Amino acid sequence: MVLLSKRKICKFCENPEEKVDYKNYKVLRRFVTEQGKIIPSRITGTCARHQRELTKAIKRARNIALLPYSYDVTQSYK
Amino acid sequence: MRYYENLFIVNPNIEQEKFTTLIQTVKAEIGRLSGNILNLEDWGKRRLAYPIKKHRYGTYVLVQFESENVGLVKELESWLRMNQGVLAFMTVVLDEKPTSSAQTATPVAPASNA
């Protein structure tokens, strides 16, 4: 899901055009696990500032059903 | 001047006519509360990440507006809450004036998923 190269660079710093936005759930989806949990920046390499924005965006997206609060991996959602 | 956006989900099973009237009333309501609509986007029917009021699908509508009336959001939300056709809604204060509308309608797909 997230690249595991030796040097991790914040995706959003790399590409300043891409704003962290709760509406852009397709991008946000890369920063949550299969279960829907937020992946720590230690893993994704996101910088502190963008991780903060990301967390907020993911929570907003969950609120309005763009992202799930949780996802049961053992039971597929129908 | 403050900029807001409200994303709300409409019951996808209501008739087109009712949907149009709903959108019209939302517009009118914002106008009545001295707000000025900047963008209004219909995202169409989408699958919800989790069921809301037993619905698995919903029609998303995004409204971006500006206003100086601080009580607007409260009134608008209470109005939306009363409305039968609206499943859920969320209002967010924007940091800056929203730009073009097309930008948000189709979220940009990630370039790579490596």
Image (cartoon, helix red, strand yellow):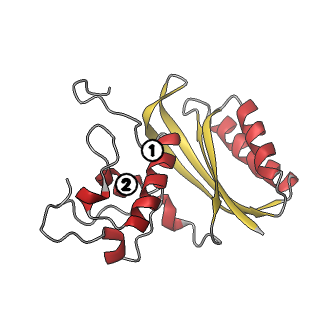
**Could you tell me which chain the residue with mark 2 belongs to?**
A
* Res B32 label: none
Task: Please determine whether, in this image, residue B8 is positioned above or below residue B95.
Answer: above
Out of B23 and B34, give the one closest to the viewer: B34
Task: Please determine whether, in this image, residue B106 is positioned above or below residue B10.
Answer: below
Residue at the (38%, 63%) spot, across then down: B108
Task: Please determine whether, in this image, residue A26 is positioned above or below residue B8.
Answer: below
Q: What's the CA distance linking mark 2 and mark 1?
A: 10 Å
Residue at the (32%, 64%) spot, across then down: A46
**Could you tell me which chain the residue with mark 1 belongs to?**
A
- In the displayed structure image, the side of residue B1 where residue A58 appears, left or right: left
- In the displayed structure image, the side of residue B45 where residue B65 appears, left or right: right
Q: Label 1: which residue?
A: A66
Residue at the (45%, 68%) spot, across then down: A19
Instruction: Compare marks 2 and 1 and give the one earlier in the sequence.
Output: 2
Q: Determine if marks 2 and 1 fall on one subunit.
A: yes
* Residue A33: quarter of image: top left
**Amino acid bearing label 1:** Leu
* Residue B67: quarter of image: bottom right
- Answer few, some or many: residues within 10 Å of disc 1's Cα (few below 14, many 20 plus, some between 14 and 19): many
The percent position of residue B37, horizontal first and vertical second, equals 73, 61
Tag nearer the camera, 2 or 1: 2
Q: Label 2: which residue?
A: A28
Out of A41 and A3, give the one closest to the viewer: A41
Out of B37 and B52, give the one closest to the viewer: B52
Residue at the (76%, 52%) spot, across then down: B27
Q: Are marks 2 and 1 in contact (CB under 8 Å)?
A: yes
Res A64 seen here: no
The percent position of residue B55, horizontal first and vertical second, equals 50, 26
SS class, disc 1: loop
Out of B81 and A43, give the one closest to the viewer: A43
